[in-house]
């Protein structure tokens, strides 16, 4: 494996995306816990839910998914039989981004006491959680193994050249101020091994 300028080892993009899926899953678990409180008429932490959604509509939607799509295109170039699954996954990236934006707007609205029904928030949240979990599962089972098998060093070099490296502001080495509370919550509840 060759090291590239960004410091990422080419063939390790799959490992990086896999690690990120685990991180996103932790956030979905936290979000689901809050939605369950919401459902029971308990007191959910809206700020926490908004922090989760702010992250999920920024890092995954604007960094992780576009990165994957660079590799997905390369996979189809090497094996056209992967076309349909790549088309599905790419569409799912758009749907997840749209659903995430809707849920974020609904959470914003409830925080300022604007007109939004509890049922619509719960429905949006459960749909969002289901879609993102299913989507990551499909990538892990139907795409990543093939990408690992058929992409060679020169393919990963092309992928790397097309990707703008950006730090993860929540799970990366430096936690963005915006995410400090969420980072601490993850450390407490999801046992991520992070320092509080
Ligand atoms: Fe992914």
Image (tube, rainbow, N blue to C red):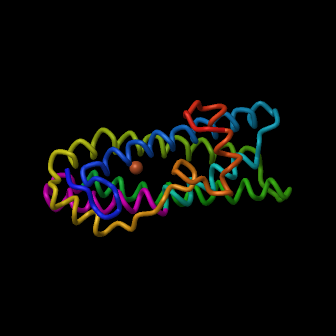
Q: Residue at x 30, y 69 (%)?
A: 162
Q: Is residue 33 above or below residue 49?
A: above
Q: Position of residue 100 (x, y in %)?
A: 58, 55
User: Start and end of the magenta stretch?
Assistant: 62-83
Q: Position of residue 126 (x, y in %)?
A: 60, 41
Instruction: Judge whether residue 134 is colored magenta.
Output: no
Instruction: Judge whether residue 68 is colored magenta.
Output: yes
Pick the front one: 171 or 72: 171
Q: Residue at x 63, y 36 (%)?
A: 187
Q: Position of residue 80 (x, y in %)?
A: 15, 57
Left or right: residue 192 compared with residue 181:
left
Q: Residue at x 42, y 54 (%)?
A: 92
Name which quarter of the figure residue 155 lies in.
Answer: bottom left
Pick the front one: 142 or 124: 142
Left or right: residue 39 compared with residue 96:
right
Name which quarter of the figure residue 125 lies in.
Answer: top right
Left or right: residue 150 compared with residue 46:
left
Pick the front one: 15 or 81: 15
Q: Residue at x 43, y 56 (%)?
A: 64
Q: Is residue 48 above or below residue 77?
A: above
Give the main secondary structure of the magenta stretch: helix
Q: Quadrant of the image for the C terminus?
A: top right
Q: Is residue 56 above or below residue 137?
A: below
């Amino acid at each position: 494996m060759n090291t590239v300028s960004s410091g990422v080892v080419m063939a390790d993009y799959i490992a990086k995306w896999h690690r990120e899926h685990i991180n996103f899953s932790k956030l979905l678990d936290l979000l689901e816990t809050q939605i369950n409180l919401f459902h029971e008429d308990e007191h959910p932490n809206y700020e926490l839910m908004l922090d989760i959604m702010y992250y999920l509509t920024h890092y995954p939607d604007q960094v992780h998914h576009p990165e994957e799509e660079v590799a997905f295109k390369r996979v189809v170039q090497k094996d056209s039989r992967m076309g349909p699954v790549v088309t599905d996954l790419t569409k799912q990236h758009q749907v997840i981004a749209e659903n995430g934006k809707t849920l974020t707007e609904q959470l914003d609205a409830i925080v300022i006491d604007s007109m939004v029904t509890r049922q619509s928030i719960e429905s949006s949240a459960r749909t969002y959680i289901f879609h993102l979990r299913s989507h990551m599962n499909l990538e892990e089972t139907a795409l990543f193994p093939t990408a690992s098998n058929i992409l060679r060093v020169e393919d990963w070099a092309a992928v790397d050249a097309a990707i703008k490296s950006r730090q993860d502001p929540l799970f990366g080495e430096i936690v963005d101020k915006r995410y400090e509370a969420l980072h601490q919550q993850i450390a407490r509840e999801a046992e991520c091994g992070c320092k509080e």
